[in-house]
Image (cartoon, rainbow, N blue to C red):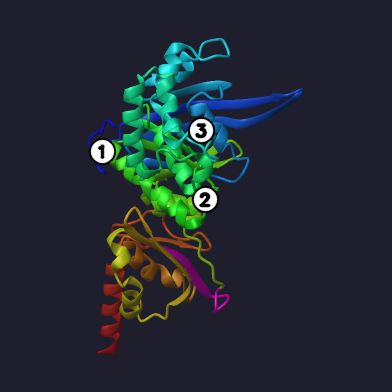
Amino acid sequence: MRRRPPRNDDCDGTTVITTTELTKVYRTGDREITALDGVDLHVREGEVFGVVGQSGAGKSSLIRCLNLLERPTSGTVTVDGRDLTALAGPGPRPGAELRRARSRIGMVFQHFNLLSSRTARGNVELPLEILGVPGRERARKATELLDLVGLADKARAYPAQLSGGQKQRVGIARALAGDPKVLLSDEATSALDPETTRSVLRLLRELGRELGLTVLLITHEMDVVKAVCDSAALMRAGRIVESGTVSELLATPGSELARELFPVGGRPARGAGSTVADVTFHGEAAAEPVISQLARTYNVDVSILGAAMDTVAGKQVGRLRIELPGTFENNVVPLGYLREQGLTVETSDGHGPPETGGPQKTAGGETAHAAHAARTARTEEADK
């Protein structure tokens, strides 16, 4: 198996997958169903990109259009610098150029799609046969790929003798047979139990790093995004309504994906006259006792109504829903203090500036710390 240089997390952001105004319309009799409605997608080299959404959002149509298993109605698909839509040609069968371009795109299916009459090694050899690779070379490469996915001892086993997770690992090995630069995964873990899902997801991430792959996966499970994805996009009704790196999404007030990734609940305990805010911790701030510091610094009672914590890409991330006594106007300075610590703060009534990090200014133009210092000085002066 040909290794590429390990992925650099600080890569230059070269785009490997691009779709422009991608549209797919299915026609049934006199009826039209728009599965994709002008999708613009950009996936950078070396990243694991998750596309999430409910059933019927257009996710599977998107991934099948990316390798032209489904031909788009309009728009373009570019993978690794090649416009696949331009290679499609007028006929229903793919031409030689499109077949060559597809060989650089691996595909992992939801239901494994293994041939029951072939062993694990025989299934991995199948795409190599299609590519015309000689028998001895096919066997050597298939054995190496099975070893790479942890199934060297199952080379002669048939699919009926394998567990669901093992079948999916064979499917992944088969997808890697053509030395792809891009790996597409269509709900690859949805038929697996939670522990097997975690194992397969770890494998996908490790393979992406070791082989320098760009991985795009389709899922409806937010835990999949948290476990392996660098970036994500939310689809609804055939459109991408939100996308970005996971860290960017978590730092964006009002992000629907951030709320789905880290849902928090909790009803206000004080009722009317209090301020409820959702606070997102990420980066170094996640390890700091910011809420207790807030309570001590401003002598304010902070109620924690709900919390969600997890690890994303090796870093601790979480969201808290807190309640402060008094209206938003009374809490501008404490909320500004939280933003100064690099946290994302969004109040339930939409108050507060959208910026995160850096000094946040109050209505009078002061930073939160400056306003606090001025207020303390005024109080001390009054006590003299």
Which mark is on residue 63?
3
In this rendering, the label closer to the viewer, 1 or 3:
3
- Residue, x 56% and y 72% (percent of image)? 267
Stretch in magenta: 268-282
Determine whether the residue tagged by mark 2 lies in a helix, strand or loop. Answer: loop
In this rendering, the label closer to the viewer, 2 or 3:
2
Task: Please state which amino acid type lies under the numbered disc 1.
Answer: Cys
Graded by Cα atoms within 10 Å as few (under 14), some (14 to 19) or many (20 or more), the crowding at tag 1 reads: few
Q: Is residue 2 above or below residue 170?
A: above
Q: Position of residue 380 (x, y in %)?
A: 26, 84
Q: Is residue 56 magenta?
A: no
Comes first in the chain, label 2 or label 3: 3
Graded by Cα atoms within 10 Å as few (under 14), some (14 to 19) or many (20 or more), the crowding at tag 3 reads: many
Q: Are marks 1 and 3 in contact (CB under 8 Å)?
A: no
User: Position of 139 compared to 120: left or right?
Assistant: left
Residue topped by disc 1: 11
Q: Is residue 276 magenta?
A: yes
Determine whether the residue tagged by mark 1 lies in a helix, strand or loop. Answer: loop
Whether residue 38 is visible, yes or no, is yes
Which mark is on residue 364?
none
Q: Closest to the observer: 358 or 264? A: 264
Farthest bottom residue? Answer: 384
Q: Quadrant of the C terminus?
A: bottom left
Q: Closest to the observer: 107 or 240? A: 107
Residue topped by disc 2: 192
- Residue, x 51% and y 23% (percent of image)? 68
Q: Position of residue 379 (x, y in %)?
A: 30, 82
